[in-house]
Image (spheres, rainbow, N blue to C red):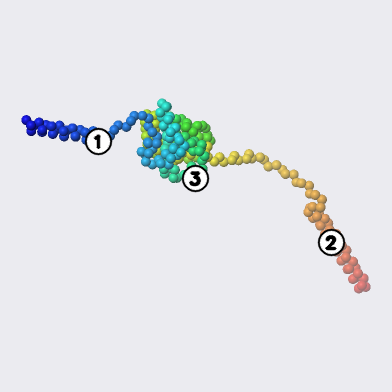
Amino acid sequence: MTKPFCFMFFLLLVSLLHCIKTSAQVPAAAPSGPPNITAILEKGGQFTSFIRLLENTQQDDQINTQLNNSNQGLTVFAPTDNAFANLKSGTINSLSDQQKVQLVQFHILPTSMSTSQFQTASNPLRTQAGNSNDGVFPLNVTTSGNQVNLTTGVNEATVANTVFSGSNLAVYQVDQVLLPLDLFGSQAPAPAPSTPEKDVPVAATPKGSSTDASVDTSGALSLNHLALTMASSAISAFAAVSLL
């Protein structure tokens, strides 16, 4: 009786240890709640510059707050580190703090949009930056098959990948930093209206000018020529008298 009992106790102990080990290997379930934009971008692995810009402008907290308190959701266009590297040196640092906030907000739509919704979206898209009229913060979307392009009036970007898609947040990878017209557009000056050429009156030449001088000179030349002719005639007459 003792040996079977010990054997059964040993099997029970082994089974218990196995259950404990198995339960320890199962990862704990992630807490439910709204998504965190910084965590999503960090998981993407190529958005370090955009994350830094979000944190410096405190727009990361603003996004997370909106996701907690809004049912409409958000759409974020996230430029890659390569997109920031392609900018001219000093492009971001030349902006004021307020302009950096507007730049980030230009990459955010105040509603969550799926890729299929871009097919029927009305232009210009409304961004968190505000006024979407021409010359301010217009953002237009064009589609060709499954490809989605974004144009700002300064540059054009392509939606390259879906980073995250949830019930109230969509994050898309873009290959260029979206540069709004209001911050980066150089408006060429309007050409001056053409006017018919007017006849410019010729100013009266003042007395003693070069014109009068030329007239006086020509008159003097005529008198000199007459004097020389008379002198020549006198010399010829004198010579003729001398020969007689």
Q: Is residue 48 left or right of residue 207?
A: left
Q: Residue at x 43, y 29 (%)?
A: 66
Foreground pick, 149 / 64: 64
The local secondary structure at tag 2 comes to helix
Tell me how far mark 2 sits from mark 1, CA to CA: 128 Å
Tell me how far mark 3 sits from mark 1, CA to CA: 49 Å
Q: Nearer the viewer, mark 3 or mark 1?
A: 1
- The quadrant in which residue 222 appears is bottom right
Residue 225: mark in rendering? 2
Q: Position of residue 144 (x, y in %)?
A: 41, 36
The answer to whether residue 138 is visible is no
The local secondary structure at tag 3 comes to loop
Give the residue type that dot 1 points to. Gln
State yes or no: discs 3 and 1 in contact (Cβ < 8 Å).
no
Give the residue type that dot 2 points to. His
Q: Residue at x 54, y 41 (%)?
A: 186
Foreground pick, 124 / 174: 174
Foreground pick, 176 / 141: 176
Q: Is residue 86 left or right of residue 236?
A: left
Q: Position of residue 9 (x, y in %)?
A: 13, 32
The answer to whether residue 217 is visible is yes
Q: Is residue 217 left or right of residue 94?
A: right
Image quarter hosting the C terminus: bottom right
What residue does disc 1 label? 25
Q: Position of residue 39 (x, y in %)?
A: 37, 36
Residue furthest top in the image: 71
